[in-house]
Image (cartoon, rainbow, N blue to C red):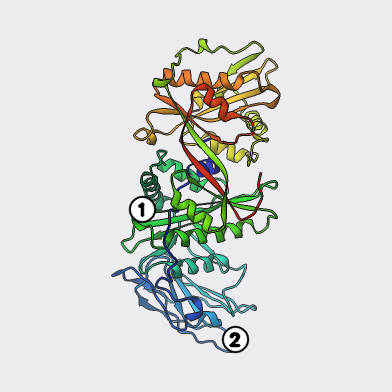
Amino acid sequence: MRNGAVARTIARAPLFGEAGHWHDGAFERLKNCAHAHLVRRSGEAVAAVRAALAVDDAGVTQASNDLLEVGAWQIFLLGDVGQGDGLAVIHSGKGDHKAHPVLAARAERDGAAAVQAAGAEFLVFGQGASWGISDRFCRSSDYPIPMSQTLERLIRLSNALPAGFTAHPCDVERDVAELVALTNANYHAVGYPLLYSEGDLREDLTSFGMDAPSQAIVVRAPTGVIAGWAWAIGATDAEKPRAYLNGGVHPLFQGIGLGRNLFAWSRDRAEELLAPFEGATIQAQTVEPDKRTQRLYVAAGMRPIRYYSEMLLRFANRPTSSRLSDAPIPAGYQSLAIADVDLEALRVLKNHCFADHWGASAMTPIEWHEYLTAESARPALGEVIAAASGELVAYQLTGAFPQDTNTVGHVLWVNNLGVHREHRNRGLARLLLERHLIRAQADGYEGSMLGVDAASLTGANKLYESVGYKHYSGAVRFILGDAEFS
């Protein structure tokens, strides 16, 4: 299964790829913030708020403003934040870069205060004894920041970055093209052939359960280009709550600590997402040839738990008919086009077919809709088999990834294949595969690919090998610590 939000993310995970060390970066640690500290891009002058701390008897912070050189989403710290009398000012990246006065300041009973600048261009945070947990929000024009883990996480990442590097919440439309280029550059560097398109990644970043501004972060180099990124996405069903980590560092910026810092950010975000769920696990996946990322995961306390194989069949090596009549439907069954079936009934069948597979969770109607309408989906080339009663009992869903033409060739994908448990061992899976190959051959494709769990409980990998598929590339799933998952 190569498309679908979480499925595609796991099957085609970008690379953290990091062998560097931790860096303190240009910020001093919070405990050392007795004075104002600033990181900025060289030569970039924009407006920021500079607050002069003065608290009256009512505890209301008075503030004035000034001009400083500070980049979008960079943090300006004033006063001793660690002692509770400081402010953190974040420029949101919006507005006309003019200085504005602080409009409001407010003392809270718990000692926390949030101040928002005019024009929603700045987020100004003051906190009591520590940067602790609070359910209060301070909103910019497009991005809410809780006065709790989100700000702490951003500050920790900023503290750890090398001088001149800056951290930014992910903006899908702004960042997607660069993220695709970064991801594919990583794949090329390690010799992995399956690439991302902008559509693929945009679907991942906007899929159900994914809020890119709060669940994904990008790090920009001093030149402004994206050097690395990370995300954490939750799959918090009741039976198998989990979160997946993902991210990458461009090959040009590997070895300076970005990967470890981004991994730490995504792990912390995952733990926050999973806090309400007992027995939840954190997982990550990387492609088979990327030994650097595998070492990073192991160093972080993760262990490999599953291996996946992407298999390829080339028609040049395997004679294939171009007539569907050479693979007839057996008596008692009928073939249906995807367009002619009840898609909700097909979703129920899909969930049934994979209920006994490792790590599988039922696909919700929203996820199912995203899966069927993905850029890569080719529903017209799929097929469903129904019993004489009309019950749907088997199916094959097809996809295509034109971006792989230069690395793999012009191939069609079996995105998903399933047979109802009561109708297995009757040759239906092999039949659907053969009819898929016939369609691909007739439409001018050079071959077919599919992905499979190397330890499939149903023996699917053995079936694929018997049809003519061979291992071409692969991936390794990791799980954090000693957590169990099935």
Q: Residue at x 56, y 54 (%)?
A: 302
**Disc 1 element:** helix
Mark 2 and 1 residues: CB-CB less than 8 Å, in contact?
no
Q: Is residue 379 above or below residue 163?
A: above
Q: Is residue 190 above or below residue 61?
A: above
Classify mark 2: helix, strand or loop. Answer: loop
Mark 2 or mark 1, earlier in chain: 2
Q: Which residue is mark 1?
A: 251
Foreground label between 2 and 1: 1
Most distant residue in the left direction: 43
Q: Nearer the viewer, residue 171 or 262?
A: 262
Q: Is residue 481 left or right of residue 124?
A: right
Residue 358: x and y, percent?
64, 39
- Image quarter (top left, top right, bottom left or bottom right) of the C terminus: top right
Instruction: Name the amino acid, label 2.
Output: Ala
Q: Is residue 336 left or right of residue 191?
A: right
Q: List the residue tagged with mark 2.
A: 58
Where is residue 194 shown, x and y percent of the image? 42, 38
Image point 36% across, 69% down: which residue?
Answer: 163
Badge 2: how crowded within 10 Å, few (<14), some, or many (20+)? Answer: few
**Residue displayed at 51% across by 36% down:** 309
Residue type marked 1: Pro
Instruction: Report x, y in % for residue 15.
Output: 44, 50
Numbered label attached to residue 191: none
> How many circles with numbers are drawn on the protein?
2
Q: 481 or 228, which is in the foreground?
A: 481
Decide if residue 247 is in sight here.
no
